[in-house]
Amino acid sequence: MKYSKIILVLTLLLFQIGFAQEKADVVLNKALSEAKKENKNVLLVFHASWCQWCKLMEKNMNLPETKPLFDKNYVTAYLDVQERGEKKVLENPGGVEMMSRYKGKDAGLPFWLILDPKGEVLADSFNDKGENLGSPATPEEVDVFLAKLEKTTKLNKEELSTIQKVFVKKKAQ
């Protein structure tokens, strides 16, 4: 009986550990290591489960026509931040602090960075006015996004055009 309680407690502990989010620095270091091996940059996206713009950005990046383009050019890593209530457990420990370190604390979500394999920031989700593009949707926002992608990858004009068509929201007709 005594051993069964110990086994139950250990099982529950291992179960919880299995669902614990990785620390933000672990996620980033894994991405940087992979980027170094694959000669790519890292696209680090800070997002949350409640954020509709985050979901749209992730959806747009993972469509059949865009996913291969992002995968070919970036190691993409996601950090869960700014969760609420019972969803707080979804956060990557240290994610909010990391976001703050990159001046994204008050930027809104999604907030993203493009880093070289050494961890140096090549681009961020701010436009030249200091506004967070988040999930770019207007033609102007998407143009800024594309310029950042073009600066940090070898995407050609046709590939950039594919991304543009996906990200620009069509006006209601």
Image: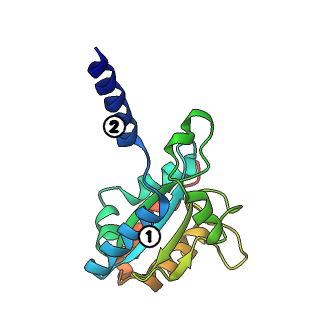
Quadrant of the drawing holding the N terminus: top left
Q: Residue at horizontal 46%, vertical 57%?
A: 23
Q: Which amino acid does label 2 sit on?
A: Leu
Residue 165 image point, x, y percent: 44, 64
Q: What residue type is labelled 1?
A: Leu
Q: Which one is nearer the viewer's eye here, 26 or 108?
A: 26
Helix or strand or loop: what does disc 1 sit on?
A: strand
Q: Quadrant of residue 169 in the image? A: bottom right
Q: Which of marks 1 and 2 is in front?
A: 2
Q: Which mark is residue 120?
A: none
Q: Residue at horizontal 45%, vertical 58%?
A: 78
Q: Residue at horizontal 27%, vertical 19%?
A: 4
Q: Which one is nearer the viewer's eye here, 88 or 121?
A: 88
Q: Quadrant of residue 6 in the image? A: top left
- Farthest front residue? 2
In the rendered view, tell whether residue 91 sits above or below residue 142: above
In the rendered view, tell whether residue 133 sits above or below residue 87: below
Identify the residue under disc 2: 14
Query: In this rendering, would 30 be left or right of 131?
Result: left
Residue 116 image point, x, y percent: 43, 82
Identify the residue under disc 1: 43
Q: How far apart are marks 1 and 2 (CA)?
A: 31 Å
Q: Which one is nearer the viewer's eye here, 43 or 161?
A: 43
- The numbered mark, 1 or 2, whose residue comes first in the sequence reads 2
Residue 130 image point, x, y percent: 71, 74
Q: Residue at horizontal 55%, vertical 37%?
A: 87
